[in-house]
Image: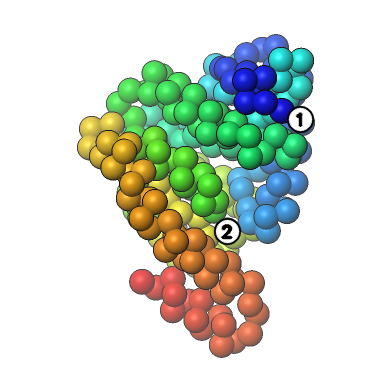
Amino acid sequence: MEHQDIIVRVANSGDVHLASTITDEMESSAKARGTGIAKRSPDYVAMKMLEGKGVIALTKGGDWVGFCYIEEWSHGKFVANSGLIVSPEYRKTGVAKRIKKRIFDLSREKYPESKIFGLTTGLAVMKINSELGYEPVTYSELTDDEVFWAGCKSCVNYDILMSKGRKNCMCTAMLYDPKDHYEPKETKDYFEKKSKVYERLMRFKQFLFRKKSGTKKSLFHAFFNF
């Protein structure tokens, strides 16, 4: 599918019938990666569409391509661009980057004073975020909203998160602060310089997590105590 044949726009009531397709793909994609995401119901995704807080990608013929939505936390002090998902047949077309850019712009329009953050296990998403001006941060710089962290209970890595006192996990935290941030070119250049480091870090986390021996568990706990 050519890039120009995919439409990326704010979702609306006419897209609600696609909510189940979107949540099914979110779940199957997480299982295929062997990582976790906070599960969302079709009703929840439909609500985001009705609120004008979702961005959807479609072919000109109306086939679903991708989706992402906004969540607000700590009474609007923070917002997250969550649930980014692209249909398998349309991956590597550049559409994920277009969706992320549109949902970022929508977040800035709706919540101009809010910090925008995300948690991801994907290097590709980190790259896209860095091009928008996000910076890698510690978990302590994210929202302390208990409802947000409760949403991680459905993630396969929840036990890791809680064992580290919510200070670390398999995901990398990234943040855009409208009042204190580098320019996108600076964050993009920094990510490109450090991308190999991030890639090795993610692989190391996954390696340690999947090993079951006592020695490897000891290494795992030592690694996350930095």
Q: Residues within 10 Å of mark 2 (few under 14, many from 20)?
A: many
Q: Report which residue position mark 1 lands on.
A: 20
Q: Residues within 10 Å of mark 1 (few under 14, many from 20)?
A: some
Q: Quadrant of the C terminus?
A: bottom left
| Camera-nearest label, 2 or 1 | 1
Q: Residue furthest bottom?
A: 215
Query: Element under label 1?
Result: helix
Instruction: Identify whether 84 is placed above or below 18.
Output: below
Residue 5's x, y, as percent? 67, 19
Identified by mark 2, the residue type is Tyr
Residue 93's x, y, as percent? 63, 34
Instruction: Identify whether 192 is placed above or below 100.
Output: below
Q: Report which residue position mark 2 lands on.
A: 158
Left or right: where does residue 76 sit relative to residue 158? left
Q: Which colour style is shown? A: rainbow
Instruction: Identify whether 113 is placed above or below 11.
Output: below
Residue 168's x, y, as percent? 44, 61
Residue in view at x 51 percent, y 83 percent: 218
Q: Can the viewer see residue 184 in this picture? A: yes
Residue in view at x 23 percent, y 32 percent: 179
Q: Quadrant of the N terminus?
A: top right
Question: Which of the pair 213/96 is nearer the observer?
Answer: 96
Image quadrant of residue 6?
top right
